[in-house]
Image (cartoon, rainbow, N blue to C red):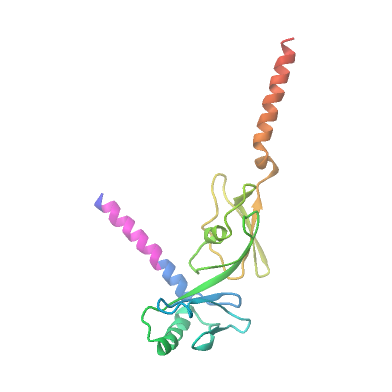
Amino acid sequence: MRLARFVTALLMLGVTFASVAEGQDFVLRPGDAVRVIVPRDTTISGTYAVDQGAHVAFPIIGRFNVGGQPWSAVSAPLMAAFRRELREPGITLIPMRRVVVLGAVNKAGDYLIEPSASLSSAVAASGGATPDGTVRRIRILRDSLTIVANAPRGQEILEMPVQSGDRIFVQQRSWFERNTAFLITAMLSLTGIIATFSLR
C-alpha cells in the first residue's frame, strides 16, 4: 500500500513538473494574454492581451515586449518591474493561450487557457459538446494546416495538446448515432407489425 502511494505521488509530481516546464517554455503570440493577480490591489489584477507587435499594455509599468522569448525569460523582468512599483510579494503572472472553439459546443467563441492545458480544457471552457456533438471527432485548424483527430471507438481525444491560435471544431455525431433511439423504436414497431400480420 505504501509503495502504491509512493508511486502515485511520484506520478503526480511528474505531471506537476511537466506542466511547470511547459509553461516556462511557452512563447506568447499575438492574441495570447498575460493574467496578472495582485491580491491587495484588484484594480491592477486582470487579463491583458498581446497585441500584433507582441507587446502588452500593463497598468503601472506601461507597455512591455513579451514576444520572441520563452516565458521563463519574459516573466522575471516583468515581475521585477511590477515589484518595483507595488512592493507586493503576492503578485502572480500567468501566460495564457488564445484558442477558438467552434462547432457542436454549447458556447462557441474565443477562450484563454493556460499553456499546460490540453484539448479538454478548451472544450470545457466552451461549455462542452452539445448532445449532437462528439469529442471523439475533432478538427483543428493550426496556421495553414488542418489536423483531423479521430479517437478509437469508445475513447476520447481530450488530452491532445493545443497551440496558440488553434481553431478547434467539435464535430457532430453521425446521423446514425444521433438517431439510434429512433431507429431502434422504428425497428421494434416494424417487427411488431410483421409479427401481427404473420399470425393472421
Residue 39, compared with residue 7, is above or below; it is below
Residue drawn at the location 39% of the way across and 68% of the way down = 17
Residue 103, compared with residue 21, is above or below; it is above
Q: Specify the quadrant of the image occupied by residue 82.
A: bottom left
Specify whether 18 is left or right of 194.
left
Q: Specify the quadrant of the image occupied by residue 148.
A: bottom right
Q: Nearer the viewer, residue 177 or 79?
A: 79
The picture places residue 58, in percent across and down from the top left corner, at 52, 84
Q: Nearer the viewer, residue 24 or 112?
A: 112
View extreme (left): residue: 2
Residue drawn at the location 49% of the way across and 88% of the way down = 61
Residue drawn at the location 24% of the way across and 52% of the way down = 2
Residue 122, compared with residue 197, is above or below; it is below
Main secondary structure along the magenta-highlighted residues: helix
Instruction: Quadrant for the C terminus, please.
Output: top right
> How many numbered callouts?
0
Q: Is residue 180 magenta?
A: no
The picture places residue 134, in percent across and down from the top left corner, at 61, 50
Specify whether 117 is left or right of 166.
left
Please report the bounds of the magenta region as a residue range: 3-17
Q: Nearer the viewer, residue 19 or 92?
A: 92
Residue drawn at the location 43% of the way across and 78% of the way down = 38
Q: Is residue 9 magenta?
A: yes
Specify whether 189 is left or right of 77.
right
Specify whether 55 is left or right of 77.
right
The picture places residue 52, in percent across and down from the top left corner, at 63, 81
